[in-house]
Image (cartoon, rainbow, N blue to C red):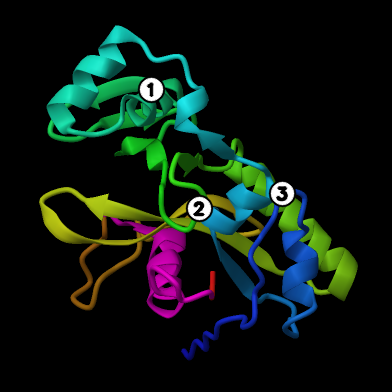
Amino acid sequence: MKATAFTVEKIPLIKPGDSIGHIISERTSLEDHDIVIISSTVVSKSENMIRSIRDLPVTERAKNIALRNNVEPGFVQAVLNESIEVLLESPFLLVRIKNGSICVNAGIDHSNVEGADNILLLPEDADESARIIKDSLFELTGKKVSVIITDTNGRAFRIGQTGAAVGIAGIIAMRDWRGTRDLFGRVLEVKNEGVVDELAGFANLLMGEGDGGTP
């Protein structure tokens, strides 16, 4: 088996209302069965998920957590607003967000957002965002591709972050190996492979972090 990956170059700074499908199709050639992997940052920007922490009414709970964690109360409030359950308040916020995922700070980011007080939320429905981009790419190119939207996640009891899938379209998230046999004939009983997370981590190596400009 052989896999080839490459970045789409010369992506402009994304603005609210920009079509991610158009931007990609204008800068690369696609083939059927390609997998297009996109940072949640550019998807969120195109969907105008930018917020100012100065505009948020702050609760006493947010103020108390902010004091303990030495962060802006408005940032904490934004995390609480995007969460359905708080699993840990300090030294950082570990929460369950509206789509059921567990992550630090509800996936809210300060980086690559203009304005000192601005933050970027995750796409409101990342699976739907992926579907829209997939359909747009088909309309523009005639090619049937899969789309994965990624975010950078930390990992329990390990140092360092890696890419993880937050939204998908046209691809199965898991590969179930249960019932198959290993090299010695033993039947596998617990073996679900997180394919889209593996692909997201692979893509993150090429995307990089910071000012790489290849999301």
The magenta span reads: 189-213
Q: Residue 87 at what x, y percent from top left?
A: 23, 25
Question: Which residue in the protein does label 2 denote?
Answer: 113
Identify the image quadrant of the C terminus.
Answer: bottom right
Q: Compare residues 190 and 72 and report the one nearer the observer.
A: 72
Return the residue found at the far top.
60
Q: Compare residues 83 and 65 and report the one nearer the observer.
A: 65
Q: CA distance from mark 1 to mark 2?
A: 18 Å
| Residue sitting at x 44%, y 80% | 206
In this rendering, the answer to whether 89 lies above or below 50 is above
| Residue sitting at x 75%, y 85% | 29
Task: Place residue 34 in its image quadrant.
Answer: bottom right
**Badge 1 or badge 2: first in the primary sequence:** 1
Residue 208 among those drawn in magenta: yes
Q: Is residue 105 visible?
A: yes
| Residue sitting at x 13%, y 57% | 158
Q: CA distance from mark 3 to mark 1?
A: 23 Å
